[in-house]
Amino acid sequence: MPASDGIEPLRGSGLDGTDAQRIYRYMLLARAISEKSWLLTRQGRVLFTMPCDGQEAADVASAYALDRGNDFIVPYARSLGAMLVKGMTTQEVMLNMFGKAADPNSGGRQMPMHWGYKKLGIISMGSSVATTIPRAAGVALASKLRKQNAVTMVYFGEGSASEGDFHEGLAFAGVHRLPVVFFCNNNGWATSVPVNLQSAEPQVAKRAQGYGFPGVTIDGLDPLTVYQAVKAAVDLARSGEGPTLVEAMTIRMMPHSSSDDHLRYRTQEELDAERKLDPLPRFRDFLISANLLNEESDQTMSDSVDQEVEDAIELADAAPSPDPDSAMDRVYAP
Amino acid sequence: MPASDGIEPLRGSGLDGTDAQRIYRYMLLARAISEKSWLLTRQGRVLFTMPCDGQEAADVASAYALDRGNDFIVPYARSLGAMLVKGMTTQEVMLNMFGKAADPNSGGRQMPMHWGYKKLGIISMGSSVATTIPRAAGVALASKLRKQNAVTMVYFGEGSASEGDFHEGLAFAGVHRLPVVFFCNNNGWATSVPVNLQSAEPQVAKRAQGYGFPGVTIDGLDPLTVYQAVKAAVDLARSGEGPTLVEAMTIRMMPHSSSDDHLRYRTQEELDAERKLDPLPRFRDFLISANLLNEESDQTMSDSVDQEVEDAIELADAAPSPDPDSAMDRVYAP
Amino acid sequence: MRLIEAVREGLREEMAADPGVFLIGQDIGINGGVFRVTDGLLEEFGPGRVIDSPLAESGMVGVAIGAALNGMRPVVEIQFADFIFPAFNQLVSEAARMHYRTNGEFPVPMVIRAPYGGGVRGGLYHSQSVEAYFAHVPGLKVVVPSSPYDAKGLLKAAIRDDNPVLFFEHKLAYNTVRGEVPDGDYTVPIGEAVVRREGRNLTLISYGLSVHHCLEAAETLAAEGISCEVVDLRTVSPLDTRAFLESVRKTGRACIVHEDNLTGGVGAEVAAIIAKDAFEYLDAPVQRVAAPDVPSFPYSPTLEDALLPGPPDIVRVARELAAY
Amino acid sequence: MRLIEAVREGLREEMAADPGVFLIGQDIGINGGVFRVTDGLLEEFGPGRVIDSPLAESGMVGVAIGAALNGMRPVVEIQFADFIFPAFNQLVSEAARMHYRTNGEFPVPMVIRAPYGGGVRGGLYHSQSVEAYFAHVPGLKVVVPSSPYDAKGLLKAAIRDDNPVLFFEHKLAYNTVRGEVPDGDYTVPIGEAVVRREGRNLTLISYGLSVHHCLEAAETLAAEGISCEVVDLRTVSPLDTRAFLESVRKTGRACIVHEDNLTGGVGAEVAAIIAKDAFEYLDAPVQRVAAPDVPSFPYSPTLEDALLPGPPDIVRVARELAAY
Ligand SMILES: Cc1ncc(C[n+]2csc(CCOP(=O)(O)OP(=O)(O)O)c2C)c(N)n1
Ligand SMILES: Cc1ncc(C[n+]2csc(CCOP(=O)(O)OP(=O)(O)O)c2C)c(N)n1
Ligand SMILES: [Mg+2]
Ligand SMILES: [Mg+2]
């Protein structure tokens, strides 16, 4: 399957066929991990998860637009796809899911899907949403002061954009034209609260003009669209032109978390309809039509992804838990 | 001097000549109190003040657009003009300036210019800026729930609009289409920090569209413009159509407070130039041209205002201080 | 009745009795709250009185204060006590001092409810005890019920109180702590502690879920011949000093127990008061059993279990105390 | 040298020595801060290292945390300690636990400076002591210098520390407290108390401006034949327990003094520790002199003076203690 076959339909996106295939594999992997993690919580083997089903295109393609070796990500709990692109292995993700000592995010101290990996430029997140937003501006400020050629991308949900920290972080970044991209994943829900109860203006991106920089709303279900928009924002940031707020319209196919039951506030019909928008089959069809994928290679890729996840689960499950005697360590830096 | 003489130039503002004269007198009074208070701090007779010189048109005319008997004001420290319109007497203002027991705002517990007067529908403010903004939304929410036909107007500076509470308060009011008017006094400065260091977008009103309601930027130095814009906003709110963000462009003719020296960060030339925009002579000239005022009636009004302030100072100075034995009272409501 | 039902009953009855009472919080409407405390209340009282808030704690509390100042009695649900900090300024700078700063003109009748506490594998942000911060703030009242009876009665008292009251419910207690709750209206007064178990040798002083740990420890200790009195503070601010001092003057030995971390916790204040006002009666130093000084409980069960204070810790310290 | 100059010197020297150190705060640039602590630093180091922030404390602290995580050593000025509360979540939920929650991967080297304290007719929002809230938070360090020497030395230590350090400067001390400050580099270690005056009959334990009140009271008491030892904590978290326990074991009597309100103040923790770990040595109950439990100091001089604890209060309590 020669990559060049598919270049034509990718034209303008800045990606070649190999990129598209890679993005697809990351999406598959994120989905597989998300689904497996859900199952693991149902089996009681893992205690908590926050599925990312429906936003793989947004997370993977946006992170793909970064200089993965030098740029920073300030993630949120559904940024699994971005974490994989940034270099986390499936094994490492599973160590986090199982809360094991070797979890590189926190040594088992934080809940699953709470990312942070110094070596990879992933800045640690806690659960208190939106605190990450001024933090990302601060990381970018340091880049500017230290003349690092780095861009910082911060991910958050549209619900979290209701917090005061959103406002304070964006305003600061605007004033100092910081190299930061604000990536809002608008899936329409903050747990059970729909976006119209967060703001009378449903488009979060409209807020950017209040801070003096561009805001764009994009189809977050198409990786090529996401890549293009984010690449433009990253280039702008890197060239010293300041931040962009990118709002990716996505879907939340699963409940908010393994503790949530979305049928309390959404109908099955609504969920079924939304599932038709699933970015994965859509991108697969695109790749097939572009001769970048066929039934067989898709199956091979899927199998390899599943195997990767299974292997990681096995290893993570068997890995040692944190030593109870270490529970009081590292309250203070030495 | 018949009021009808001046009606023509007032047409469209919704005000008649008597209104215009009243507004002018309130403006004179606010200025006189502000100037006198400044002098009192220089003499050491009063310990602190925050002058409102330059924003009398904005404060007086905006409050004039309220139903003063039923509506609520959530003020900020420079809202003196609005307090007078809402019914505070000069005497009461001076009791506050001198921190006396009979200060209706706080019984001498709060600093000067920290307003709050239950009987008059003035909701108490502390010093922590912008906390007032969600509070105003809450007052308006209660009006809606209780079917009060009241509008709440909250005043704040453009610097304070940088706080997260601004964002959270406006968003909430938008969602519930609350009867509230957000009145931002944009004088270009937060103490020594110019507005361009608060936000890359200098127009605060632009933020309103992010919350799904209108924002307008107006000349805050002309009382008729202010009255018209605020009256429209108040009418909208009262009719159930929700909030408006009104941004009045004003000037800060004096230092931030009696503890500030603005020559550390502004030039005398700049200040002199700005003083030429003083809303008081401008409105006086207008009233004269409209035959609503002449040299003589202006002088009479000025004299009566000065006398009123002098009398108030004398009485407030002589009034008893709070009883030290009461210092621990009222920590809890009974 | 389970503790969660007692809280719900308290809310429902107060809402039915007083049209000024309304609820505001995240996911409290159709979803009934993430713990289901408000389950069914939206249907019963409608969206005007059960308001799903934006994800904005400061705004939510600020709105509630404003509504309280205009004649309402808001009850705010903070989804987890851990997420109360964004609203700290509104609570400490505004709600707590509104009445004082206006010389009594503007009371703030408002309740802030929040589930607190660890042991649910919630990690650092779904496990905290935050009462000590607020117990330091004059103008706020802080209540932590240990039983369904108290939960309902104290909640009703809190809603009727003209002051801002913080009301912390241990999330592990919601469905595990059961008890008799009479039908209909009653209140439990804020500011009154209660003796949960009488004893002679030493006094265990606690609140919230930890009271049950004390009772469990007291049972174990009784078998060893150590007789413990257990005082349930119920309100941690203002403290019912008379109640625990009376007990300590009787037993001569005291140990304060809480799940919050040791340094600067409520136990410090209680210990300081005992050390001063029961000085002549003390036969042994005042002890505290609390979580060690780590930022919050970590996620991994091995780590959390290593840090959570429980009955064995109380038994160990009480033995030493009795033997002193 | 005045205390304010010592702080400025500390900042200037650390900025000159380490390009990673930068300042962020409101009005700290051309205006030099509302107290003029940063006067001249903008001219010397430029706007890239002396950043006038928007009026947004949470954002400011959040930005500083981010910069600290990317190799910088930010020093944040909060204009008045009273205005730290909007940033409470960033400090408590993020800065304090970043190192712990990442198992040591992400330290947060950051200093938060803020003027605290009353007696300046600043009313409820320009007078507070806020150290107790933060002393309860594992992961934060809290420093309150009493002398120019300590102010410079502790500030330098704080800036070089890899943990978030809160640094509170009494605003009344800025221009009234003077003392020798050597030229050039030195540090005062965080976490070490110091004995300011030796004595035999009782121990006064304090920090910040109140240390001077203790010294003044000790002078008065000396004339009456009561010999006071004065321990200056300097760091209120983590506490140097060894230092004050040693003193109390010697004198057998202790009184803790602070300007913060009594209940849940730092004095509660110190008293609880003494009551436990110096139990056998105590000849009298541990006393505390603090502001009464009001939300903050009111504006009117008659009211503020009625509430501010000072040397006469210390003298009165110390006399009782000595006579016990
Ligand atoms: C400060 C704070 N308040 C409340 C919560 C509880 N909470 C966790 S995620 C969430 C909803 C987030 O919605 P959104 O930001 O849209 O992200 P999504 O989950 O939809 O991806 C809430 C309320 C929290 N984590 N932090
Ligand atoms: C939370 C908080 N932070 C800081 C301050 C100190 N402060 C008081 S007024 C002010 C500037 C306000 O500027 P703006 O809102 O534009 O109002 P203006 O004074 O220009 O009318 C500052 C920084 C405060 N009062 N509250
Ligand atoms: Mg969402
Ligand atoms: Mg301004």
Image (spheres, coloured by chain):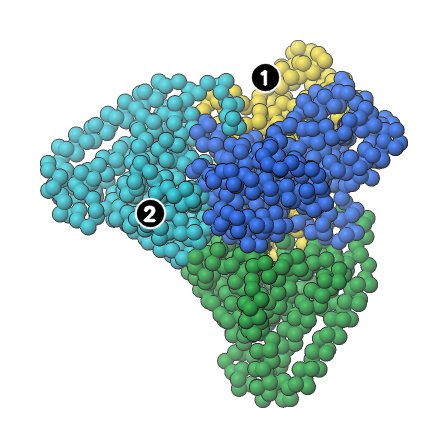
Chain colours: A green, B cyan, C blue, D yellow
Query: In the image, is B293 to the left or to the right of D27?
Result: left
- Image position, residue D166 (x, y; %): 61, 41
Confirm whether circles 2 and 1 share one chain: no
> Chain under label 1?
D
Pick whichever, B232 or D263, lies toward us: B232
- What is the three-letter code of the residue carrying label 1? Pro
Q: Residue furthest right?
A: C224
Q: Amino acid at mark 2?
A: Arg
- Compared to A81, does D9 lie above or below? above
- Image spot of residue D183 (x, y percent): 61, 38
Give the residue at x 74% y 27%.
D274
Q: Residues within 10 Å of mark 2 (few under 14, many from 20)?
A: many
Residue at 69%, 37% in the rendered image: C180
| Above or below for B15 versus C102 | below
Q: Residue at label 1?
A: D312
Q: Nearer the viewer, residue B186 or D293?
A: D293
Which residue reaches farthest top?
A: D224
SS state under label 1: helix
To which quarter of the image does residue D31 belong? top left
Report the mark closest to the observer, 2 or 1: 2
Looking at the picture, how far across and down is residue B290, in whole percent?
Answer: 13, 43
- Residue sitting at 72 percent across and 28 percent down? C195
Q: Which type of secondary structure does the marked residue at label 2 adopt?
A: helix
Q: Residues within 10 Å of mark 1 (few under 14, many from 20)?
A: some
> Would residue D94 be seen by someone viewing this image from the given angle?
no
Residue B238: numbered disc:
2
- In the image, what residue occupies the spot 64% across and 54% down? A126
Q: Is residue C18 left or right of residue C262?
A: left
